[in-house]
Amino acid sequence: MTAPSKIVADPSQAAAAPLLEVENLHVDFISRAGRTPAVRDVSFGLAPGEVLCILGESGSGKSVTLRALMRLLPQGRSEIRGQVRFQGEDVLKMPRRALNMLRGARISMIFQEPMTALDPVFTIGDQIAETVIRHTGASREKAMARALELLELVRIPSAERRLKAYPHELSGGLRQRAMIAVSLSCYPQLLLADEPTTALDATVQIQILILLKQLQQDLGMGTIFVTHDLGVAAQIADKIAVMYAGRVVEYGSAEEVLLNPSHPYARGMLASTVSGQPRDRDIAAIPGSPPDMRNLPAGCAFAPRCAFATDLCHRSEPGLTQRGAFGHVSCHHVHRLDPPAPAGASVTTL
Amino acid sequence: MMNFFKLTKATVAAPADPRDRGGPRQPMLIARNLRKHFPITGGLLGRTVASVRAVDDVSFAVRKGETLGVVGESGCGKSTLAKLLMHLVPPDSGELIFDGLEVGARDGLRLRDLRRNMQMVFQDSASSLNPRMPIEESVAYGPRVHGMGRAQARAHAISLLEQVGLPARLFAGRYPHELSGGQKQRVNIARALALDPRMLILDEAVSALDKSVEAQVLNLLRRLKAEFNLTYLFISHDLHVVQYISDRVMVMYLGEVVEIGPVERIYASATHPYTRALLASQLHADPRARVTEPPITGDPPNPVNPPGGCRFHTRCPFAETICSQTAPALTPLPAASEHVVACHMADPASGHTRAGAQARPGLVPSAFADTPGPDRTSKEGVRA
């Protein structure tokens, strides 16, 4: 089995210095009951201006990976190992003070629930200005002017009035726009987004996705977008990493992964997503449920649910097999499975 | 009395059910002019200063054996509607007729009997189970309250758990925290079936589940519907799921019904501009079909003091004066009487300049992408 230990960077971007390099990232949660792995040996790179989507179900480790990049996990109760290099600096070894200067300035984050991420007792304007003052040392007046500019950038109607609004006075969509404005206040080079549109209504979600894509392109921000929704990934991603049980099982361009997935889990996820299937037939669901992370099976974590699993899969964990120009798949039988079934086809027909 | 609990299994597609009172053509449930306004009180005297018009004059029927999908965004009243149907929240006005009997009327159906015949599955699978009760007891609880003996209720619960794919040998004694989200939702479905109901109200029942588990539960619901001869009211914000499971679809906006029609018609030729915008906002797992223009701008307005006239006029790209003045009534389309819509454009006599245009093919407002598909990007979106 070909098993390159690291991900080969996209050759087209090899010339440009990568914005972010993640190597062998492990995250464990520590409790009295013991140690639970959440992220297991995740590696990827991100070029400036590129959008990577981490796709996975709940418990797959996608949000934990994102938080580990900014060291936003509870100290003492979690352990992060590996390397996270942002513009050449190792984030995991950075002293607190340097880290604080990084957060919100060069790397910023938007969350799923703007109501809990924004401070309810400060106005939107104050919250943006705070970040600007803190990172640039601008005067309050200048910071407020910048806040207004940002609200206009995220297309909040009557921005001037909204500067003085408290988070609860805004609708869900406007609140999410306000949070995006906060995150953009210092022109970050890297934007981390954790399911930012999941709580929104369909007609609002599409507006926010279009806005994010446009801002990301205009400002040339590298972006990592965590989602469980294939449609969201299709709308925004250049590259997609599919996570399962703490590992990246498939990585590739958005088109490759969504239209032509290799890994049995990625294929199963695509087939089981409801989208215009015939109404008189069952949906090709993946049997079973994701494994208990405290008690992972010995071999491939997906083997118990996989239609192709053999003894080998139950015994040893697969390495990475190169796929396409820069992508990879973690499956013992990827060669047996090729050519991949067309998207939406039932896994069991193979 | 005990034969309520016998599991009558369907043998043919639309069988005559021995529990039927009104005959196969009598709708399972008719809701007429249901209304619920939640008052907002304020000031020292606690006077009502405004009201949330959660459900406003909603009428529809659910036929025997069908699945009626209810879609809409947050604040459109779909969950309040579910609670009104179950009488978990008493309606301000309006009537409910279950299989020919008026609910709560003197000679009608008692609330207790309504709830035996109509059960509900909620979105949050964890909070709807008692954490201190093994799941077998949770499932047996309803039948016991309705007079079944302990041993019989237990046997019934075990058979139901098997039916929903939870082998009793492994699962019966477990507590909710020992189950995954999908398994908990299966328990909730088993519990809803414990009283041998005619109809289930599924309020975002699969929305909180992961995609692979969601598919499993949808398959289960489809199988149970045939086996137990059920009628579903399926509430969801996910248009893909509603398309898969529903026979007819009802679209709600700010407490009102804007369109009802057969699922094929709604997804192929939706007529209300809101339905069209909703469909155009659907995301597809194809990166080549990216949407670059939002089909509609703004958020759904606050249901406190909703806009007058047609409630959608503030976001509608085709709104004219008439739309802000008069509320359109639900009227059947000339092309298909099954398909009703509340829009001035669908009513030739309304005075809207586009009135009647949609009844004729080829004159459908072109601003919306006709069908959500891979070629949507090339079409022009609408900016309100």
Image (tube, helix red, strand yellow):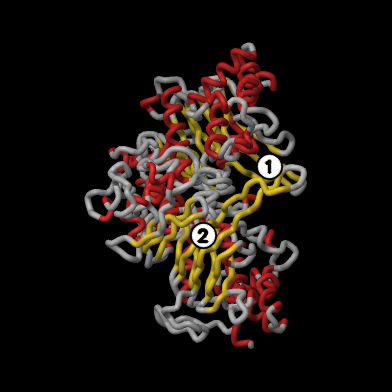
Q: Which chain does the numbered disc 2 sit on? A: B
Label 1's element? strand
Q: Measuring 35% from the left and 42% from the top, which residue is drawn there?
A: B318
- Is residue A116 visible from the viewing direction of this image? yes
Badge 2: residue crowd in 10 Å (few <14, some 14–19, many ≥20): some
Query: Image quadrant for the N terminus of chain A?
Result: top left
- Say above or below: A297 vs A6: below
- Left/right placement of residue B85 relative to residue A258 reads right
Label 2's element? strand
- Say above or below: A190 vs A344: above
- Left/right placement of residue B8 relative to residue A236 reads right
Give amino acid for label 1. Answer: Phe
Q: Nearer the viewer, residue B383 or B327?
A: B327
- Image location (x, y in percent) of residue B180: 61, 58
- Say above or below: A284 vs A74: below
Mark drawn on residue A29: 1
Query: Image quadrant for the C terminus of chain A?
Result: bottom left
**Residue highlighted by disc 2:** B57
- Image location (x, y in percent) of residue A100: 66, 22
Q: Measuring 45% from the left and 43% from the top, which residue is drawn there?
A: A203
- Left/right placement of residue B131 relative to residue B248 reads right
Please state which of the two labelled residues, at mark 2 or mark 1, is closer to the viewer. 2
Q: Measuring 64% from the left and 62% from the top, which residue is drawn there?
A: B89
Badge 1: residue crowd in 10 Å (few <14, some 14–19, many ≥20): some
Q: Are marks 2 and 1 on the same chain?
A: no
Give amino acid for label 2. Answer: Asp
- Image location (x, y in percent) of residue A51: 45, 32
- Is residue B159 visible from the viewing direction of this image? no
- Say above or below: B135 vs A123: below
Q: Nearer the viewer, residue A19 or A44?
A: A19
